[in-house]
Structure formats: structure tokens, C-alpha cells
Image: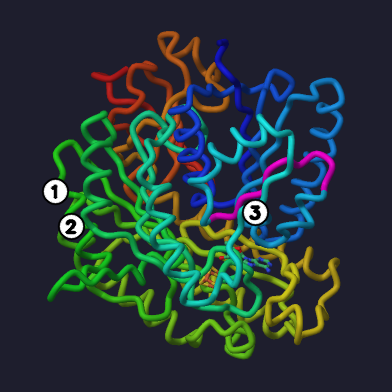
Amino acid sequence: MPTRKIHLKSFGCQMNKLDSSLVVGALGEQGYELTDTPEAADVIVVNTCSVRENAENRVFSNLGHFKYLKKSNPNLRVAVIGCMAQRLGDELLAHEAVDIVAGPAQLHEVPALIAEAMGDHDKHLSVSEKIRQPAASEQVITDSHKLDDFELAYDTDANHIKSQAFIRAMRGCNNFCTYCIVPFVRGPEVSRPPEAILEQAKKLAAQGIQQITLLGQTVNSYQYKAGEKTYTLADLLGQVSEIDGIGWVRFITSHPGRFDTSILKVMANNPKVCPYLHIPAQSGSDRILKAMNRGYTTQQYIDLMDTARAIVPGIAIAGDFIVGFPGETDDDFEQTVELVRRVRYKNAFVFKYSPRPDTHSEKKLEDTVSDEVKQQRNAKLLEVISEISAEDNERFLGKEVEVLVEGLSKKPNLNRAENNNNPQLIGRTAHDYIVVFNGPESLTGQFARVTVTKTAPLTLFAAPRPSTA
Ligand code: 5AD
Ligand code: SF4
């Protein structure tokens, strides 16, 4: 029988990308292969995101296209999985293009659901009912580990840029920030057993993986009780770093509430734990932080960043901000700008507030800030962030940095002729700075030392050391 082909479309965060690569891995075990062309696919898998409305709209426009593809290929099966699947369930299943709907906790069922849909040409739904109930959480614990036990697929953009891989430390979220849909679609926090994480890391290291990123929506709340001991993120980082072949360990994303300094200490004392913290503040106004239910004040956040810098000198701090949260005034926004100036982020993402169905802020707070003002604040904040990183990045000029080379840059032919015909490569430093430089493609997946020759807000440009050129 000819190999069946899957076309994958993955939206959203790093956690989704990891899920996609596990699902593709699971389908790979059933003999499926990836294809870039939806027209050539037997199955299309769309892994969805619900965090903002525009992410959902993009999924619907893709489904419109797949409906049309089904007209010429009636055997095509379309599976919609992930957060939107959990949020919309039956409503999504009713869409003409859709055959299978599976939520984030049911992804291990996807191969079986596809096999059924292939056979009976029927529609199949598998999502969590009452996702926030303790019983659902028990089910999530048992079922979700099944997905994580699948082999990761290599060639999705999801995982493995040759030398690096993501591993789930925990899933779900218990914070209930008032704007956020995640707790409703990904369910309660569940930490994976440390042995499972370490075993996966060892397996990946044996395959040549040099960098592991531990993932969790609030990864610093990782906690696993085994007998007398409660394992924390700091323990995990230490143990993963000891695995033969692992050069760097990272983790994303951290929540500023209950952030334990043991994590900073392991970073300071263990050169393999990358000095990089993605720790969203979301706003610099106490009034807004309270309305967001973030659980900290601006001053507490600043104090934590100061502590981080005292314990780990030179630590790179990244963040997320939401502009235009209900009731955000010009003054609130100015306080956010001030916080950005005070913390001096390596980089920060800025999002316009998007009311999400059934969240507290959507139900109880009016979306008062016009889209125009949201847009202005978004642009202004990005400008300040970029001004700061442009200034701060200049300190790298003339300095040698170590990068883990990810592969060809988006413009591999840039400056090629001047560089012994070596293509432009892209790599990242331990502090997560993106570095582009010309060098032999064989450096892909290796650590290399390069000297910074030019800087920009988001990128460092470098020349390789003569020995590697
Ligand atoms: N509107 C806009 N941005 C949001 N985020 C989460 N929910 C929303 C929303 N309803 C942002 C937060 C979070 C990031 C992943 O997405 O900044 O850190
Ligand atoms: Fe959403 Fe807040 Fe949980 Fe992050 S911490 S996933 S923003 S509820």
C-alpha cells in the first residue's frame, strides 16, 4: 500500500508545536509521512490556538480552503485538534470541512480517530467534558502521559532544529488570569514525573540533541511529589544538564508569582542552564494587574527582576504585554512604558487585548479601548522595546559569543560571495540572542564561537572565527 500523507498546519505557542510533533510522530508510527502540499494529503491535521480571536479566524479561513479541496478529493480527512477543538467541540465538528475534533488532552487518540474516520466516513469528536473538574484532571493525568510517550517527529517545524528539542515538563494552568482562555482549554496543571522527562531527555541526547527546552504554561510551578521528595523546576534543570551530550537547558514560560529563587541559583551555578528568563509582566499598572488577576504588583515584579539580575549577572529577560485591557487609560499605559524602560527587556511580545469567550474579563468587563488606541499603544510599546534593545545590544560589538547553530538563515545567499561561498547561518546564544553569520553549513547543530560585527534590535550579525570559516 502506498504511504499515506499528512499535511500539518500548526498555530500558536511552543506547547502546540510540541503537541504537533508528537501527533505527527504518533502518525509516523502508523506509516504516515508529512507533505508540504495540502493537495497531496490524505489527512490534514490542523493544530489550533484560541488565545486571541485572530488565531481562530485564521483557522476558519484555512478550513474554507480545505472544504474546497474535499470536493476534488472526497477521501481527504481533516482533523482539527488542540485548543479551539476543546473550546468549540460540536460546533467545529459541524463545519463541512471537518471530520475529526480532538482536544489537547485527547491527542493520543488522533491516530485511532483518523483510522475510524477513514473507514466509516463519519464525524468523530473527542474532547474533555468538565475540563476543570478533579475527575477530568485525573483523566488528563493518565491520558496525557500517553501522548508524551510517543516519539517526536523530526521534520515538523515543531521540534528539533537538528540539535534541539522541546520536552513537556507540565501542562495546563491554574492561574486564571482574567483575560486568558488557557485554563479552560488546557485544563488544570499537571506535572509530569521527573523520570519520564529525564528518560526522554536521555533518549534525545543519544540521538544527538544538544539543547533541551522544558515547557510549561507556568513552568516555574512544576512540582512532582515522589515519596518524601518534591521535585521542582530547579531539580529538573540540574538533572537534565547532567545528561551526557546535553550542552544547554532552557525553560519557558515563567509566571512572576511564586517564582522561586532556587531556579536563579541553579542558573548562576550551572553553566549549562541558560541565563534567559521569559517572564511576562503583562502590564505595568497595578490597577490593571489586579483586574487581570496576575497576583503581583509592579514593584514586586521589579524586585524580582532585580533579584534575578543580582543572582545571575547579565541574565536576559524577555516578556509579554497586553495593551488595551478593559479600562486601561493613557496613564495605565504610560506605567507599562515605564516598566519596560526600567526592566530593559532583551525582547518582549506585545498583544492587543482580545476578549475570549467565557473568560472573566469577557463576561464582566467591557472592552473599552478602541482598536485604534490598542494599535497605537501596541506600536508605541514595540518602539520603546526596540529602542532599548538597540542600545543594549551595542555592548556586544567586537565581542566573541558562543552560539548553537540552527541552520541556514532565511537569506542563505546573503554575503556568500565575500565569504568563501559560505551561506548565511543562524544561531542562538545561551542568552537567546539570534546571531546570523556566514559559515559552512556543516556547523548546523554544533556550537560555534563567532565575533559580533554589527547589531540590530532583534539580531546580532557576526563573523566566524578564522578556524571555522
Ligand atoms: N488577548 C490578548 N493577548 C492575550 N494573551 C493571552 N490571552 C490574551 C488575550 N485574551 C497573551 C499574553 C500571554 C501570551 C501567550 O498571549 O500576553 O502571555
Ligand atoms: Fe493564561 Fe495566565 Fe495561565 Fe499564562 S498564567 S496561561 S496568561 S491564565
The amino acid sitting under disc 1 is: Glu
The residue mark sitting in front, 1 or 3, is: 3
Query: Magenta residues, as a range?
Result: 95-104
User: Which residue does the numbered mark 2 point to in the structure image?
Assistant: 238
Q: Secondary structure at mark 2?
A: helix
Q: Secondary structure at mark 3?
A: loop
> Is disc 2 surrounded by few (<14), some (14 to 19) or many (20+) residues within 10 Å?
some
Q: Is 331 on the left or on the right of 450, as rendered?
A: right
Q: Residue at x 30, y 41 (%)?
A: 211
The quarter in which the N terminus is drawn is: top right
Q: Earlier in the sequence, mark 3 or mark 2?
A: 3
How was this image coloured? rainbow
What is the distance, in whole Å, between disc 3 and disc 2 at their CAs? 32 Å
Residue closest to the eye, 445 or 180: 180
Main SS of residues in magenta: loop
Q: Position of residue 437 (x, y in %)?
A: 43, 27
Mark 2 lies within 8 Å of ligand 2 (Cβ measured): no
User: Which residue does the numbered mark 1 point to in the structure image?
Assistant: 242
The residue mark sitting in front, 3 or 2, is: 3
**Above or below: residue 253 compared with residue 39:** below
Residue closest to the eye, 282 or 189: 189
What is the distance, in whole Å, between disc 1 and disc 2 at their CAs? 7 Å
Mark 1 in CB contact with mark 2 (< 8 angstroms)? yes
Q: Position of residue 19 (x, y in %)?
A: 50, 46
Q: Secondary structure at mark 1?
A: loop
Mark 1 in CB contact with mark 3 (< 8 angstroms)? no
Q: Earlier in the sequence, mark 1 or mark 3?
A: 3
Q: Residue at x 52, y 48 (%)?
A: 107
Q: Residue at x 83, y 81 (%)?
A: 368
Q: Indicate which disc residue 135 carries.
A: none
Corner quadrant of residue 104: bottom right
Q: Indicate which disc residue 49 carries.
A: 3
